[in-house]
Image: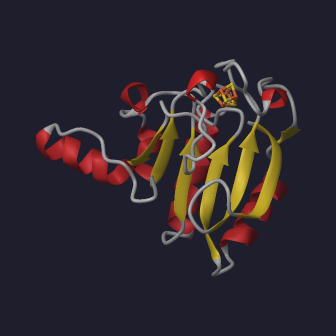
Amino acid sequence: MRYHNITKDDMLNGDGLRVVLWLAGCSHCCKGCHNPVTWDPNGGLVFDESAKAEIFEQLAHPYISGITFSGGDPLHAANRADVRTLMAEIKEKYPKKTIWLYTGERWESIRHDPAMAYVDVLVDGEFVQEQKDAKLLWKGSRNQRVIDVQKTLRQEGEAGLALHCADYA
Ligand code: SF4
């Protein structure tokens, strides 16, 4: 897994103050993408132990609400397994911190991915320039959704009910 940046005290990519991991690799090629430099899965830096330690050090601060995985696409084939492993480790070490995930995939195609067990809030779908709206909270275009993943999984399991927007949406 490779990454471009780790940003700290971020207020734009999820609720509260967050650490954000910007991963390399995306195959969605959305027109108007704000970050095409992240498309190449071979770009950026190797995500190594020191990068992980940098994230954990941030998560240890009580004022940090959690981590957001963005990119690029954290669910790109080059990232998916390593992201899941990292999420599991974070949830074990910092169970009170929230995990947000931005992906170009739609919920319907990833809802059975084991990584969803660790995700609190998912912002799904490709960026569609024709549906861009600067007034939207946490997302760039109207087709995208801010999903409360755990509530949605619980309700799907119980009654096959549809997806739940996060309170932040
Ligand atoms: S999914 Fe995100 S990073 Fe990938 S092309 Fe679309 S807007 Fe850019």
Instruction: Name the colour scheme.
Output: secondary structure
Q: Is residue 4 left or right of residue 153?
A: right
Residue 22 at least partly seen: yes
Residue 119 at least partly seen: no
Q: Is residue 144 left or right of residue 11?
A: left
Q: Give the quadrant of the N terminus.
A: top right
Closer to the camera in the image, 67 or 36: 36
Residue 92 position, x and y percent, is 51, 64
- The residue drawn where x is 24% and y is 38% is 162
- The residue drawn where x is 77% and y is 25% is 39
Residue 23 position, x and y percent, is 73, 39
Asked which quadrant contains residue 57, the reply is bottom right
Q: Is residue 142 above or below residue 61?
A: above
Q: Is residue 1 left or right of residue 87?
A: right
Asked which quadrant contains residue 58, the reply is bottom right
Residue 16 position, x and y percent, is 60, 68
| Residue furthest out toward the left | 159
- The residue drawn where x is 86% and y is 29% is 43
Q: Is residue 101 above or below residue 81?
A: below
